[in-house]
Image (cartoon, grey):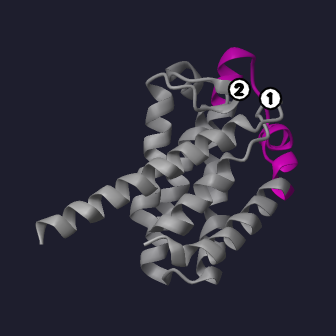
Amino acid sequence: MELTANKIRARDMAYTGAMVALTAICSWISIPTAIPFTLQTMAVFLAVGLLGGKRGTIAVTAYVLLGAVGAPVFAGFSSGPAVLLGQTGGYILGFIGSALLMWGLEKLWGTGLKALGVSMFLGLLVCYAFGTAWFMFLYTKNTGPVGLWTVLGWCVIPYIIPDLVKIAVALGLTARLRRHVK
């Protein structure tokens, strides 16, 4: 029995590591702007979709922690606490909030693709909320007051359609690959 438990743990670690690596690669595919266009959110959704709430959240958290300690896994090969405390930090930390919400909704609604699609959308809203609040705080602290609608225009509205496409791609990949991930 112990051998089986060890195999499961090794498999979980391998899947988790693969999703951390995929998230890093997706962050490197980037169009630099104030908040870079990356594929990170797609990788976050895919991690939870393929691995389930618990393992997916562990993978997302491991990715953020890896970047926090200095591995160049964030957009533009950046890393460290300065990135998390910078203007994109709230969005990166929002990935953990997204994954946690998706995990909780998985427990309520199950793992069907419709439920997963709704949880991905709601997870995206959590990421937007974390990131926008942090961006507004930093901008106000460093530059002066800024309105919510202005920040949404800079940091959220241009990303909505690309992020919805990422959700669709993550759902499609989850539907095709889920049976291969145990």
Q: Please determine whether, in this image, residue 135 is positioned above or below residue 16.
A: above
Q: Quadrant of residue 175?
A: bottom right
Mark 2 Cα-neighbour bin, 10 Å: few <14, some 14–19, many ≥20: some
Residue at the spot x=60%, y=75% of the render? 116
Q: Residue at x 78, y 36 (%)?
A: 30
Q: Residue 89: where, in percent of width, then height?
A: 60, 32
Numbered disc 1: secondary structure = loop
Asked whether 110 falls inside the magenta stretch, the response is no
Residue type at tag 2: Gly
Specify the label residue 76 is tagged with: 2
Residue 128 percent location from the top left of the image: 68, 49
Work out whether residue 136 or residue 13 is closer to the camera in this orientation and state it. 13
The image quadrant of residue 28 is: top right
Work out whether residue 15 or residue 58 is closer to the camera in this orientation and state it.
15
The quarter of the picture where the N terminus appears is bottom left
Mark 2 / mark 1, whichever is N-terminal: 1
Residue 132 seen by the camera: no
Question: Disc 1 designates what residue?
Answer: 34
Residue 2, position in %: x, y?
12, 66
Tell me what residue is drawn at x 82 percent, y 49 percent: 159
For the point 60% across and 72% down, the residue is 177
The stretch of residues the image draws in magenta is 137-161
